Image (spheres, rainbow, N blue to C red):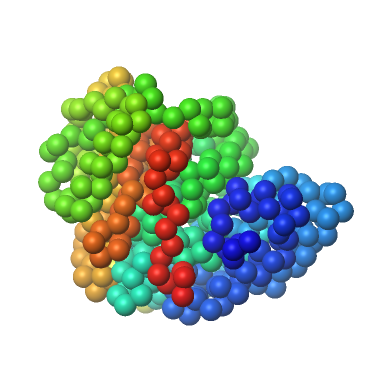
């Protein structure tokens, strides 16, 4: 068997079930790779090596004795440092909270442990999860593993989760998405990310940025693994009223149906302006491939531009973030990331009228968008405007989430999957956008695409080192 750290979760689970792999060897491989690569990659803010090894030994003994909990028993995972674990530090990406000890445990973490999974550690995030580039002035910016020579954007805010999965330090990880923070790191690290609909997965015990928009989601190497983690994490939670009333979605009956007969929307031609030529070329090839597999491609006319929707999304984010963090960001002595502080402080200039107007605009545009897309099963766009750029080239007054923020604004779900490489060897990504609570359709289309391509199997140079 090859190094287990390079295998997807569904393969690892089958190997453990067949006795060809032990959780001890799997966890040891992940931790050994982390010890060797982490000084350069900076994916983790903390590695729980001792606890993970103890948990692996316990899992191995339980499985050998016939007490396997289920298919994820003994599988390692990493969680973003917004996820609270009682008794452990939860910094939320800010040095101001370096001593903040969590007094509760997130519901999603409890589900991971209940399934027998082993948490390897907590991954870096942009401060307060507010930023798509993936940088962090005070705690460190993870290194995108696709370029060993140049420090490129890892994608944020789930930067460490994206790098850890991409570099094969962990089979999968937890991210959160308020304006693209699962999909952006997935796209720039050549992996798969599922942006779930609000209310699918509990945010109890997950440090908030914008309660209206925040959604946790899986960052994985394959669509099949994303479906597995999505199924585990979703469900009602008495601690999170947003989850109430949503029947769990089961993607498995339709996952392998393919795309024949589906109607897929081609994003409007006007939105192509400003997108990197290699990104567009990969997108066009992806659309053509899905058409060759039997999907009907439909040109769409939408009621608003992506940039306009994203701007309103940003106002909601800033207003809600400032309401929670004003005391901290208004304190000039607080050791904050000076790229993030002004993003949060922008909320001070948003009046209650402006905020309520933004929320009303959201509710007005939801049915307008639904009407414009009622005849398609999904819409296809590139995930990112460009491939990962050098960190030194970032304009922190801009956002890379031009093609992702609008999805959160309209409360849709979306899947980002690798769909090629630039001439420089950097990954690019396809975004599959579906109606809210239709994650099963996004996963179905993504699975069909990944059965016809092998972009998701590619390994970054720094992972192979």
Tell me what residue is drawn at x 32 percent, y 45 percent.
430
The image shows residue 76 at horizontal and vertical percentages of 63, 59
The image shows residue 316 at horizontal and vertical percentages of 31, 45
Q: Is residue 370 visible?
A: no
The image shows residue 151 at horizontal and vertical percentages of 32, 74
Q: Examine the rendered structure and indicate whether residue 340 appears above or below residue 41.
A: above
Tell me what residue is drawn at x 52 percent, y 37 percent.
200
Q: Examine the rendered structure and indicate whether residue 259 appears above or below residue 353.
A: above
Q: Is residue 307 visible?
A: yes
Q: Examine the rendered structure and indicate whether residue 110 appears above or below residue 121.
A: above
Q: How many marks?
A: 0
Tell me what residue is drawn at x 21 percent, y 70 percent.
393
Q: Examine the rendered structure and indicate whether residue 411 appears above or below residue 45.
A: above
The image shows residue 439 at horizontal and vertical percentages of 46, 34
Tell me what residue is drawn at x 59 percent, y 58 percent.
77
Residue 188 appears left or right of 438 = left
- The quarter of the displayed image where residue 211 is located: top left
- The quarter of the displayed image where residue 422 is located: bottom left
* Front-lying residue, 140 or 189: 189
State the quadrant of the N terminus.
bottom right
Most extreme residue toward the right, as rendered?
65
């Amino acid at each position: 068997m090859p190094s287990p750290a390079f295998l997807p979760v569904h393969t690892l689970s089958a190997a453990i079930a067949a006795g060809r792999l032990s959780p001890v060897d799997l966890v040891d491989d992940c931790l050994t790779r982390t010890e060797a690569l982490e000084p350069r990659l900076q994916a983790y803010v903390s590695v729980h090596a001792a606890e993970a090894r103890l948990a692996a030994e316990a899992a191995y003994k339980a499985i050998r004795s016939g007490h396997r909990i289920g298919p994820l028993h003994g599988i390692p995972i990493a969680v973003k440092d917004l996820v609270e674990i009682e008794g452990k530090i939860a910094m939320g990406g800010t040095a101001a909270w370096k001593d903040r000890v969590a007094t509760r445990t997130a519901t999603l973490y409890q589900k991971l442990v209940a399934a027998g999974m082993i948490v390897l550690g907590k991954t870096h995030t942009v401060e307060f999860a507010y930023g798509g580039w993936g940088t962090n002035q005070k705690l460190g910016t993870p290194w995108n593993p696709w370029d060993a020579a140049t420090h490129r954007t890892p994608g944020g805010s789930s930067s460490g989760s994206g790098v850890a999965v991409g570099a094969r330090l962990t089979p999968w990880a937890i991210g959160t998405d308020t304006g693209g923070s699962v999909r952006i790191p997935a796209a720039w690290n050549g992996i798969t990310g599922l942006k779930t609909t609000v209310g699918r997965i509990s945010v109890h015990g997950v440090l908030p940025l914008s309660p209206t928009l925040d959604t946790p989601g899986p960052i994985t190497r394959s669509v099949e693994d994303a479906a597995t983690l999505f199924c585990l994490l979703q469900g009602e939670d008495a601690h999170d009223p947003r989850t109430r009333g949503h029947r769990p979605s089961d993607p498995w009956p339709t996952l392998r149906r393919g795309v024949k007969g589906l109607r897929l929307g081609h994003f409007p031609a006007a939105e192509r302006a400003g997108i990197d030529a290699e990104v567009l070329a990969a997108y066009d090839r992806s659309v053509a491939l899905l058409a060759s597999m039997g999907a009907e491609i439909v040109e769409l006319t939408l009621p608003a531009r992506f940039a306009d929707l994203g701007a309103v999304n940003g106002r909601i984010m800033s207003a809600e973030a400032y309401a929670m963090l004003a005391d901290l960001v208004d304190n000039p002595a607080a050791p904050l990331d000076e790229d993030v502080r002004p993003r949060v402080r922008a909320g001070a200039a948003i009046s209650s009228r402006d905020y309520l107007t933004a929320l009303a605009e959201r509710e007005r545009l939801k049915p307008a968008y639904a009407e414009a897309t009622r005849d398609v099963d999904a819409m296809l766009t590139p995930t990112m405007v460009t491939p990962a750029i050098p960190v030194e080239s970032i304009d922190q007054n801009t956002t890379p989430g031009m093609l992702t923020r609008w999805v959160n604004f309209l409360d849709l779900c979306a899947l980002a999957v690798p769909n090629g490489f630039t001439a420089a060897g950097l990954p690019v990504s396809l975004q599959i956008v579906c109606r809210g609570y239709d994650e099963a359709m996004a996963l179905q289309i993504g699975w069909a695409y990944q059965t016809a391509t092998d972009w998701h199997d590619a390994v970054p140079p720094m992972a192979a080192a």
